[in-house]
């Protein structure tokens, strides 16, 4: 999503760097302006990884494997639609993560209760 936001800013003229030049800043959790004079720009090949079709994460199904390689050719309407799909997918992942943490909290409370009430003890567990 950060890369899509960068591309939208680049297309509107707010950004002059290419996405490859800005990638370190994008991945470091924040676009912090142009690179320093000591930064050597590199041309890196962009090749999609070989990911089998079965078992792919739902977020991976939102984008084609070669999406980043073709990002400059994606039109503005498609870019906005993809950004919306990613936002929806991210919300779904967040909801799943929240459910997992809620279940973990329940389990942790139960373990703490069992230790507090003397139902189990560390000594018994270590003796096994």
Image (cartoon, grey):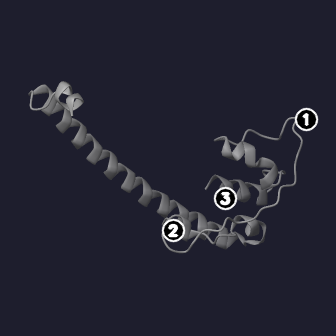
Please tell me whether mark 3 or mark 2 is closer to you in this view: 2
> Could you give the CA–CA distance between mark 3 and mark 1, rounded to whole angstroms?
26 Å
> Could you give the CA–CA distance between mark 3 and mark 2, rounded to whole angstroms?
21 Å
Q: Which mark is residue 56?
A: 2
The residue shown at (82%, 49%) is: 21
Q: Position of residue 116 (x, y in %)?
A: 13, 26
Residue of label 1: 37
Q: Tell me whether the residue at label 3 lies in contact with that at label 2, contact meaning CB atoms closer than 8 angstroms.
A: no
> Could you give the CA–CA distance between mark 2 and mark 1, rounded to whole angstroms?
40 Å
Q: Position of residue 98 (x, y in %)?
A: 35, 49
**Which residue is situated farthest in the front direction here?**
128
14 to the left or right of 104: right
Looking at the rendered structure, the secondary structure element under dot 1 is: loop
30 to the left or right of 116: right
- 46 vs 126, nearest the viewer: 126
Q: Tell me whether the residue at label 2 lies in contact with that at label 1, contact meaning CB atoms closer than 8 angstroms.
A: no
Looking at the rendered structure, the secondary structure element under dot 2 is: loop
Looking at the rendered structure, the secondary structure element under dot 3 is: helix
Q: Position of residue 6 (x, y in %)?
A: 71, 53
The residue shown at (89%, 33%) is: 38
Residue of label 3: 4
Q: Earlier in the sequence, mark 2 or mark 1?
A: 1
């Amino acid at each position: 999503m950060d890369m899509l936001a960068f591309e939208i800013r680049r297309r509107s003229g707010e950004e002059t760097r290419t996405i490859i030049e800005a990638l370190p800043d994008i991945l470091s959790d924040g676009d912090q302006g142009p690179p320093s004079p000591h930064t050597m720009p590199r041309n890196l090949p962009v090749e999609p990884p070989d990911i089998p079709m079965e078992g792919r994460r739902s977020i991976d199904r939102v984008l084609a494997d070669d999406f980043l390689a073709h990002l400059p050719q994606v039109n503005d309407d498609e870019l906005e639609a993809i950004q919306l799909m990613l936002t929806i997918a991210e919300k779904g992942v967040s909801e799943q993560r929240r459910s997992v943490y809620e279940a973990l909290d329940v389990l942790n409370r139960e373990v703490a209760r069992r230790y507090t009430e003397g139902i189990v003890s560390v000594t018994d567990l270590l003796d096994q």
